[in-house]
Image (tube, rainbow, N blue to C red):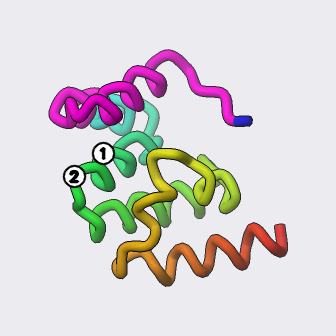
Amino acid sequence: ALLYEGEDLLIRALIRTKRLNQAETRARHVYERDDDPTSLAYVRLAKGEYTAALELLERVLAEGYLAAGEILEDELIKDHLSHETLQAFRARLVALAKNG
């Protein structure tokens, strides 16, 4: 199971309750402070900004913030992976998780 810190939990809650502007403000802060693109990727997905989300998710994977299997299972990501913009990325994640 993934364990989330307080700030991550807050951003997740803001997204789940559709308070996306507040979530984006906090996610940008985390990104600028820690150079961690994960929370900002969540916001981009929630806003339907799939091209921007894909770029961030590529970094999340490449830089080891989340493993392929974790991305596939993340509740804020998984439902968006069927979008045409993310289908090739999802296929790669499935292959990586299988070979993990």
> Which quadrant does the N terminus fall into?
top right
Whether residue 67 sits left or right of residue 20 in the image: it is right
Q: Residues within 10 Å of mark 1 (few under 14, many from 20)?
A: many
Q: Which mark is residue 60?
A: none
Q: Is residue 63 visible?
A: no
Boundaries of the magenta span: 2-26
Snapshot quadrant of residue 19:
top left
Verify whether residue 53 appears in magenta.
Answer: no
- The spot of residue 7 in percent (x, y) is 44, 20
Q: Is 100 drawn above or below residue 20 in the view shown? A: below
The residue type indicated by label 1 comes to Val
The reply to whether residue 61 is in sight is yes
Could you tell me how many numbered marks the image carries?
A: 2
The vertical placement of 100 against 47, above or below, is below
Q: Secondary structure at mark 1?
A: helix
The image quarter containing residue 93 is bottom right
Give the vertical position of 65 relative to 56 (above or below): above
Q: Position of residue 65 (x, y in %)?
A: 60, 47
CB contact under 8 Å: marks 1 and 2: yes
Question: Alpha carbon of mark 1 to alpha carbon of mark 2: how far?
Answer: 6 Å
Q: Could you say where residue 38 lies in the image, as x and y percent from the top left?
A: 46, 45
The disc placed on residue 43 is 1
Kindly state the secondary structure of the residue where label 2 is placed.
loop
- Residue 47, which numbered label? 2
Say which residue appears at 83% left-offset and 74% top-offset: 99
| Along the viewing direction, whichever of 72 and 57 lies nearer the viewer | 72
Q: Residue at x 23, y 35 (%)?
A: 18
Residue found at the far right of this picture = 99
Instruction: Locate residue 67 relative to residue 10 in the image: left or right.
Output: right
Q: Which quadrant of the figure contains the C terminus?
A: bottom right
Which amino acid, mark 2?
Answer: Lys
